[in-house]
C-alpha cells in the first residue's frame, strides 16, 4: 500500500512546523501555555480528531498524528499526546454525558491526561492536566484534579513531563467503560509515540546532514567523505521506513482497521529502535564540536531513550507481534 499526505494534511504539517519553528523552545521543563493556546486556537491541534458535535474539528486521529509528528520534530514540550490519548479514551469508553461535557473542553485546549489505576506513576502531564480520566478495574472515572494527589516526577528528558497521580475512586465520578478506554488509550499512545519518534528522527538526520556540510576536516567538509555519505544514506532509509511504519499504523488505528493492533506494535517497536540508532549516529557524527548542554544533539539523545520506554518498550511490542 502506498501512503502519502493529502494536500490538506501536508498544509497542516507545514503550518504546525512553521509555528513551532518560530516560537518553540525545547529547553523548558513546562510547555509554553501561550504557544499551546495558539496551536489550539489558530490551528486547532487539540480538536482535530474530535467530532464536530463534541466541539471538535471533525477530522480523524490521523490528522492529529500528523500534527504530533511535527511536535516530535520540534523537540518542544507539548501536552498534545496526553490530551489526544484522553480524547480517544473518552470516545471509546466514555458515556454520552461524559463525552458531551469533557470533549469540548479538550477540543478548546484544556490539558487532559489518562491515568491507569488509582495510584499511577509516570502519568503524562499528570500534574498539569485539568481533565483527569482514570481507568480503575473495569470502570472509567472522572477525577477532580483538586481531589487528587499529584507530584511531578523529574526525568532525564526534561521535554517530557511525567507525574505520580493518586486518587480515591470512591470520591470519583463513574463515566463509562474502563476496559474499552484502556485498550484504545494503549493503541493511540503507541502510535502517538511512534509519530513523535518519526518526527524527531527526521530532525536529527537534518541536523547531522547540515553539520556535515559545515564541519571541515583535512581541508574538506566531512560530508564529502564517502564513509559518512554512506552512513547518512543508511539513516535516511531508516527514517523513511519509520515514517512508513508510523503512517500505516496511524491510519489503521484511526480507521479501526482489523490489523490496527498489530501495526501499532510494529510501529512502536521499529520506530523506537530506529530513533535510538539515529540518535546515536547524530551524537557520533557531531563529534567535531563535542556534545554539550548548549547543543540540541543531547536533547535528541535523551528524548530517544525516553520515548523508547513511553507506552511500552520495543522489546515488549515485538513480543506482542510474535504472539
Image (cartoon, rainbow, N blue to C red):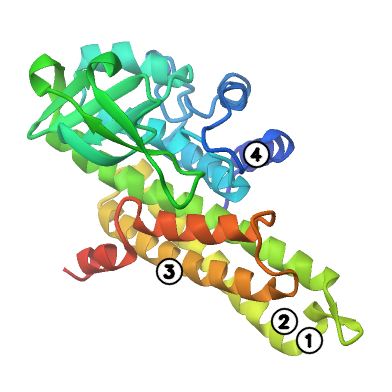
Residue found 34% across the figure and 31% down from its top: 126
Which residue, given by chain and number where applicable, does mark 4 sit on?
25
Separation (CA) of disc 2 from disc 1: 6 Å
Quarter of the picture holding the C terminus: bottom left
Q: Residue at x 65, y 55 (%)?
A: 296
Residues under labels 3 and 2: Cα distance? 21 Å
Dot 4, crowdedness within 10 Å: few (<14), some or many (≥20)? Answer: some
Real-space CA distance between mark 2 and mark 4, rounded to the nearest whole angstrom: 31 Å
Q: Which mark is residue 229?
A: 2
Q: Which sits earlier in the primary sequence, circle 2 or circle 4? A: 4
Q: Nearer the viewer, mark 4 or mark 1?
A: 4
Q: CA distance from mark 1 to mark 3?
A: 26 Å
Q: Position of residue 234 (x, y in %)?
A: 60, 78
Residue marked by disc 1: 225
Count of marks placed on residues: 4
- Residue identified by numbered label 3: 273
**Circle 3 SS class:** helix
Q: Residue at x 52, y 57 (%)?
A: 198
Q: Is residue 3 visible?
A: no
- Indicate the position of residue 320 as horizontal and vertical percent values: 21, 64
Disc 1, disc 3: CB below 8 Å? no
The answer for how far apart the CA atoms under marks 4 and 1 are is: 33 Å
- Left/right placement of residue 179 relative to residue 273 reads left
Q: Is 37 located above or below residue 225 in the figure?
A: above
Amino acid at each position: 500500500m502506498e501512503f502519502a499526505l493529502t494536500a490538506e494534511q501536508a498544509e497542516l504539517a507545514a503550518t504546525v512546523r512553521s509555528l513551532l519553528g518560530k516560537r518553540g523552545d525545547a529547553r523548558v521543563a513546562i510547555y509554553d501555555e501561550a504557544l499551546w493556546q495558539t496551536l489550539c486556537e489558530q490551528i486547532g491541534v487539540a480538536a482535530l480528531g474530535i467530532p464536530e458535535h463534541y466541539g471538535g474539528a471533525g477530522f480523524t486521529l490521523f490528522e492529529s498524528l500528523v500534527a504530533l509528528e511535527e511536535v516530535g520534530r520540534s523537540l518542544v514540550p507539548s501536552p498534545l499526546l496526553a490530551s489526544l490519548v484522553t480524547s480517544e479514551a473518552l470516545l471509546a469508553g466514555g458515556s454520552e454525558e461524559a463525552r458531551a461535557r469533557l470533549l469540548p473542553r479538550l477540543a478548546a485546549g484544556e490539558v487532559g491526561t489518562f491515568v491507569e489505576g488509582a495510584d499511577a506513576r509516570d502519568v503524562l502531564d499528570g500534574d498539569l492536566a485539568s481533565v483527569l480520566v482514570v481507568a480503575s478495574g473495569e470502570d472509567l472515572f472522572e477525577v477532580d484534579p483538586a481531589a487528587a494527589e499529584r507530584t511531578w516526577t523529574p526525568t532525564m528528558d526534561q521535554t517530557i513531563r511525567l507525574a505520580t497521580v493518586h486518587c480515591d475512586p470512591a470520591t470519583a465520578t463513574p463515566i463509562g467503560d474502563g476496559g474499552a478506554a484502556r485498550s484504545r488509550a494503549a493503541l493511540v499512545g503507541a502510535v502517538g509515540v511512534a509519530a513523535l519518534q518519526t518526527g524527531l528522527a527526521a530532525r536529527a538526520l537534518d541536523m547531522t546532514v547540515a553539520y556535515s556540510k559545515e564541519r571541515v576536516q583535512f581541508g574538506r567538509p566531512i560530508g564529502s567523505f564517502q564513509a559518512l555519505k554512506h552512513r547518512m544514506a543508511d539513516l535516511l532509509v531508516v527514517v523513511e521506513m519509520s515514517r512508513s511504519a508510523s503512517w500505516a499504523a496511524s491510519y489503521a488505528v484511526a480507521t479501526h482497521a482489523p490489523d490496527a493492533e498489530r501495526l501499532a506494535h510494529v510501529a512502536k517497536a521499529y520506530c523506537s529502535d530506529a530513533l535510538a540508532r539515529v540518535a546515536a549516529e547524530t551524537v557520533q557524527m557531531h563529534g567535531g564540536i563535542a556534545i554539550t548542554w548548549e547543543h540540541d544533539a543531547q536533547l535528541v539523545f535523551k528524548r530517544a531513550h525516553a520515548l523508547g520506554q513511553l507506552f511500552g518498550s520495543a522489546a515488549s511490542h515485538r513480543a506482542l507481534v510474535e504472539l
